[in-house]
Image (cartoon, rainbow, N blue to C red):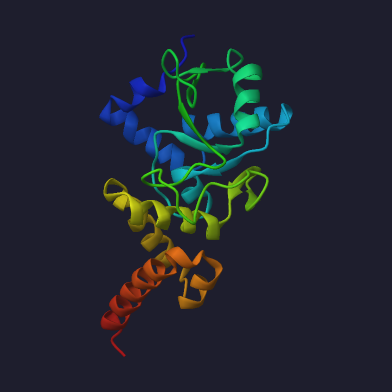
C-alpha cells in the first residue's frame, strides 16, 4: 500500500481540510509524526523542546501548522544528524542542516538551536535557551513553557516586521488563558511593555463588550 505524502495532501483542498480536522482532534499526520519524533529523540537521548505553532496547540491555542519546530542544542543537532537522519528522517533538500522531513509521510521538521535569537536573528536579551530548561511535558511531549513561548514570540514579533503573526499569537494566548498584567513579571523586561500593550488592548475590548 503506498504511503500518504503530507505535501500531496496539502495540495488538495478536500484532503487538507480533512487533515486539519484530524490535527485538531489529536490525530493526522503531523501529530503522528510528532509522537514518533518525540519517542525517537528520547530513545537517542537527545534533549529537545517543542516550539512554534505545535507548541501553541499544546497550550490550547488551536492553529493548524504544516511543520514541527524543535529546539535542540548544537550537540543535540549533531546527534540528530548522525543518528537519526537516514533512519526515519532526511534533509529537506541537499545540504540542509536544520530542515528535515520524515521519510514515511514527508512531514517538515525545522530545528532551532540554543544561542540563536528570535525574529530578526540579531542579538537581544531574549534568545533560545538550552532545551533541558523551561519545558513541561504535555501529552508525553516536552513542550516549551507558556512563559517562554510568549517571551520568544514577543521578541520575534517586536524585532522582525515580517513576524507580526507572533504578536497575534501572543494576543490569542492572552485572550485564551485570561492572562492578566501580573503575568508580565514572568517575562524578560525587554518584552514586558509589548505584553502589557497587548493585554490592555484585550482588557479594553472586553470592557467595551460588557453589558454591565
Residue in view at x 40 percent, y 43 percent: 121
Front position in the image: 146 or 118 = 118
For residue 172, above or below residue 40: below
Image quadrant in which you'd find residue 113: top right
Q: Where's the C terminus, which quadrant? A: bottom left
Tell me residue 18's x, y (percent).
37, 34
Tell me residue 44's x, y (percent).
72, 26
Front position in the image: 148 or 20 = 148
Residue located farthest toward the top when viewing the structure as drawn: 1
Tell me residue 103's x, y (percent).
51, 16
Residue in view at x 46 percent, y 77 percent: 181
**Residue 37 left/right relative to 200:** right
Tell me residue 16's x, y (percent).
33, 31
For residue 182, above or below residue 143: below
For residue 187, above or below residue 209: above
Front position in the image: 91 or 177 = 91
Residue in view at x 66 percent, y 43 percent: 140
Amino acid at each position: 500500500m503506498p504511503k500518504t505524502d503530507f505535501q500531496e495532501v496539502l495540495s488538495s483542498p478536500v484532503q487538507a481540510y480533512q487533515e486539519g480536522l484530524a490535527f485538531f482532534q489529536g490525530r493526522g499526520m503531523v501529530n503522528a509524526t510528532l509522537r514518533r519524533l518525540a519517542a525517537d529523540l528520547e530513545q537517542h537521548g537527545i534533549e529537545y523542546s517543542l516550539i512554534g505553532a505545535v507548541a501553541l496547540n499544546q497550550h490550547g491555542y488551536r492553529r493548524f501548522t504544516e511543520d514541527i519546530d524543535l529546539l535542540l542544542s548544537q550537540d543535540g543537532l549533531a546527534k540528530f544528524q548522525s543518528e537519526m537522519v537516514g533512519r526515519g528522517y532526511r534533509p529537506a533538500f541537499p545540504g540542509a542542516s536544520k530542515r528535515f522531513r520524515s521519510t514515511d509521510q514527508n512531514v517538515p521538521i525545522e530545528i532551532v538551536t540554543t544561542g540563536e535569537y528570535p525574529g530578526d536573528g540579531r542579538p537581544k536579551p531574549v534568545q533560545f535557551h538550552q532545551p533541558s530548561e523551561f519545558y513541561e511535558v504535555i501529552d508525553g511531549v516536552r513542550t516549551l513553557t507558556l512563559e517562554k513561548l510568549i517571551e520568544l514570540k514577543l521578541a520575534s514579533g517586536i524585532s522582525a516586521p515580517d513576524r507580526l503573526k507572533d504578536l497575534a499569537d501572543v494576543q490569542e494566548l492572552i485572550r485564551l488563558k485570561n492572562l492578566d498584567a501580573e503575568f508580565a513579571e514572568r517575562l524578560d523586561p525587554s518584552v514586558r511593555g509589548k505584553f502589557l500593550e497587548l493585554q490592555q488592548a484585550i482588557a479594553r475590548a472586553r470592557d467595551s463588550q460588557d453589558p454591565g
